[in-house]
Image: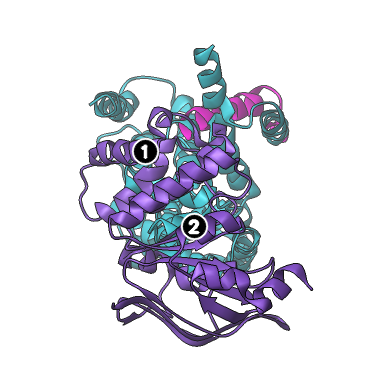
Chain colours: A cyan, B purple
Amino acid sequence: MKFWIPAICILVLGVALPLAPINEYVFYAGYVVLTFVVMATAWNILGGYAGYVNFGPPAFFGIGSYAAVVLFKSMNAPLAVQIAGAALMGGLLGLGVGVLTLRLRGIFFAIATVAITFILETLMTNWRYVGGATGLQLLRPPVELYESYTRMLFAVMAGMSVGAVAIARYIQTSWLGRGLRSLRDSEEAAEASGVPTLKLKLFACAVSGALMGAAGAPMPMYLSFIEPPSTFNLSYTVGSLGGAIIGGAGHWAGPIVGAILLGTLQQIVTVTVSGEMNVLVVGVLLVVFVVAAPEGILGLARKIIRR
Amino acid sequence: MSSILKIVDVSKTFGGFTALSNVSLEIAQGERFGLIGPNGSGKTTLINCVSGALRNEAGTIEFDGEDVTRLPAYQRTRRGIARSFQVPRPFHSMTVAENLAVPLEYIAHKGSLHLGDTHAEALELLRQMRLGDKADTPSRNLSQVELRKLELARAMAARPRLLISDEAMAGLSGSEVEEVLEILFQLNSRGITIIMIEHIMQAVMRFSQRVVCLDAGRIICEGAPAEIVKNPEVQRAYLGA
């Protein structure tokens, strides 16, 4: 209950707020921040809980975006179906990368996730149906209930954020989470304690990938455009990994704190200084946190409370 | 006496190095079994093959009548083979009690989703291992002897029928060795078969009913403790004389 009451309040707020007469820009920027909440939360399930670093969030995000575009273009699928299809593709990609690399330990998985981003970007660049290198303009369907498509997408992404966090929290507090933590600490000891390490890692990979895929699904509609370079962009790696680490990896609340802080800061810098500067901000913050507070903001808070 | 573990012609190589060649062993239900041998003789490799951490290239391993040679480690633990590690491998991000919760949740209470059920059981196990007052201590703050006890406690939480203690006493003081020995005797009296790998001769000779000595990946002799210490081959392997 301690979790569900605030969660439902936030969900209601996220759905209701776009109905209020507030400046459109708030939702335009807020949507991006919420996307990073989902991305960082998804990254944390594998990177934070199990200790397997995924450098390829753009691959999972991108496969979600393109899955949505294909569904939209081929059968005019509604947004909910696009999101479901994107989650499925993201989950399958996670499973695939996992099966190929997780039998080996450590660095192989990280390298494979870097490679998969390039492979997918190249594939999409050469696929005419989805616009190839020049991209594809999309005509948004008319929006109901909300005043604009952006406002509607903000509400959708708010729902997805709450959903992603609820899933991440369930995993962390259940036997699944304890199993993932045990294999992060020592895979041999985990196996000797009856933990099916390979199965658990594949599970984490698939869930993490599915959430990232789902997060990417509404992006083409948000921009009413899709093209490979911005879809498979490094900024998604920085945002997911940065959000989780700065907030505090390993705890479900960490990525929320980190992604909101980072996302908001990036939006402010983009508007007040320049679009190029916002990447620098994340870079500097990451270095500062890794050196001075490796357990992130949550870790810092815990230290202060204990004193 | 029926045998609980049957190792038949097991061989293991690492590149060109033969760590085990045609090792065959049979261990009886309820037995206290000692495995000795100089450093690098293949004791831990053999145990890794039995527990599933390594796969042997040749030979078979049968546990309780079932061929487990190709089973992954976690499946073997679930069937009743538990081990401690020579170099303690605690789940360092967890407390002592949480360390035990992992095998309790994955083996003893597998399938039941009532979390928290395991806590009372973890505390009882810790009390038996004389770690009761450390339940909420982060495992990274434990002393060497406490870490060894945690290794045994975690192995016990898997409810094993065969417990493999891999140098659980290395680096401990005399009184601490006594304490761990006493714990192992107690576990054995409850019907658990125990394989003890140890360098501390007094301990392993007092504990074991039967001892096997490995040297360079082969069994060089087998017998009661008193016979083993007198065996010229064992003396040569250890003293190089």
| Magenta segment includes A258 | yes
Which chain letter goes with mark 1?
A: B
**Residue A113 location, x and y as percent?**
60, 60
Tag 1 secondary structure: helix
**Numbered label attached to residue B126:** 1
Which residue is label 2 attached to? Answer: B206
Rendered view: A72 above or below B221:
above
Residue at 63% across, 42% down: A238
Residue B168 inside the magenta-drawn segment:
no
The answer for how far apart the CA atoms under marks 2 and 1 are is 25 Å
At x 34%, y 52%, the residue is B187
Q: Nearer the viewer, residue A106 or B79?
A: B79
Q: Amino acid at mark 1?
A: Leu
Question: Residue A191 or A218: which is nearer the viewer?
Answer: A191
* Element under disc 2: helix
Residue A179 image offset from top left, x and y in percent: 40, 50
- Give residue A102's position: percent from left, percent from top: 53, 65
At label 2, counting other C-alpha atoms closer than 10 Å, the crowd grade (few under 14, some 14-19, many 20 or more) is few
Under mark 2, the amino acid is Arg
Would you place residue A166 above or below residue B156 in this image?
Answer: above
What segment is highlighted magenta in the picture? A255-278
Q: Give the image location of residue A60, x and y in percent.
A: 50, 56
Can you say which quadrant of the picture contains the C terminus of chain B?
bottom right
* Chain of the residue that carries numbered disc 2 in the rendered image: B
